[in-house]
């Protein structure tokens, strides 16, 4: 596996960011997916369907003895293993969709969130940096109109949850980086060629 790492102990006092390979990692997981039309509730909901999938992932990387010695200066009880760089322990997706071919209308609402993931590995004994969970919600609408034309509307990042990267030291969480992307709205038209 490849990791993005930082070395805070450079001679010029500037933190050095680099990529490196680790010798070995272990990764295992499972995923469950479910999709169902809502016509079983009432025939009036026959154009609606729901779906979700959930993934659980276990990952493990052995920390090298030299790196572990630096970590244990500040945390003598530190584990000799850590999660794999960039791997979330869980991912959740949910979908509510509407599809009415008689009226040429299609819409869906998508939700996604993933667990904390290792974003930067520290090689100098300071705490690693983790990207925190960031729930996301998107909406897409499409309406077909006469003569092979369609109008589309999308709204992305409706929750505008912040991207937050943090590191923890002695039970206190500190912000490493935090920003928002804002919401995006788009409106367009398309024409289908035969």
Image (cartoon, rainbow, N blue to C red):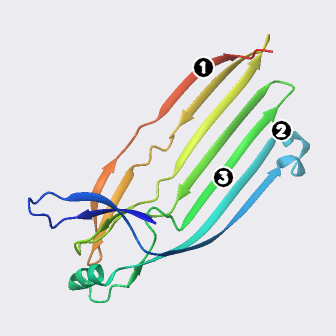
The secondary element bearing badge 3 is classed as strand
At 26% from the left and 71% from the top, the residue drawn is: 123
Can residue 118 be seen here? The reply is no
- Find the distance from the CA under tag 3 to the CA under tag 2: 17 Å
Measuring from the top left, give residue 157's x and y in whole percent. 50, 41
Can residue 132 be seen here? The reply is yes
At 84% from the left and 29% from the top, the residue drawn is: 101
Depicted 88 relative to depicted 95: above or below: below
Residue located beneath label 2 in the image: 47
Mark 3 crowdedness (10 Å alpha carbons): few <14, some 14-19, many ≥20 = some
Mark 2 crowdedness (10 Å alpha carbons): few <14, some 14-19, many ≥20 = some
Q: Quadrant of the C terminus?
A: top right
Depicted 181 relative to depicted 77: above or below: above
Q: Which mark is residue 188?
A: 1
For marks 1 and 3, give the one nearer the viewer: 1
Identity of the residue furthest to the bottom in this view: 77
- Find the distance from the CA under tag 1 to the CA under tag 2: 24 Å
Residue located beneath label 3 in the image: 94
Q: Which mark is residue 122?
A: none
At 67% from the left and 17% from the top, the residue drawn is: 190
For marks 1 and 2, give the one nearer the viewer: 1
At 76% from the left and 37% from the top, the residue drawn is: 98
Identity of the residue furthest to the top in this view: 147
């Amino acid at each position: 596996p490849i990791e993005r790492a930082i070395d805070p102990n450079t001679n010029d006092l500037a933190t050095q960011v680099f990529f490196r390979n680790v010798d070995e990692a272990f990764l295992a997981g499972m995923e469950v997916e479910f999709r169902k039309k809502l016509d079983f509730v009432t025939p009036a909901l026959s154009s609606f369907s729901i779906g979700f999938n959930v993934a659980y992932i276990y990952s493990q990387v052995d920390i090298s003895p030299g790196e572990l010695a630096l970590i244990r200066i500040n945390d003598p009880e530190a584990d000799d293993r850590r999660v794999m760089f960039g791997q979330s322990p869980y991912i959740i997706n949910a979908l509510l969709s509407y599809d009415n071919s008689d009226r040429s209308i299609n819409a869906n609402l998508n939700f996604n969130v993933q667990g904390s993931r290792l974003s930067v590995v520290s090689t100098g004994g300071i705490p690693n940096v983790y990207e925190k969970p960031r729930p996301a919600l998107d909406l897409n609408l499409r309406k077909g109109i006469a003569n092979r034309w369609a109008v589309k509307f999308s709204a992305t990042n409706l929750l505008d949850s912040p991207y937050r990267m943090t590191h923890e030291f002695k039970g206190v969480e500190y912000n490493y980086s935090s920003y928002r992307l804002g919401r995006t709205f788009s409106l367009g038209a398309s024409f289908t060629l035969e």
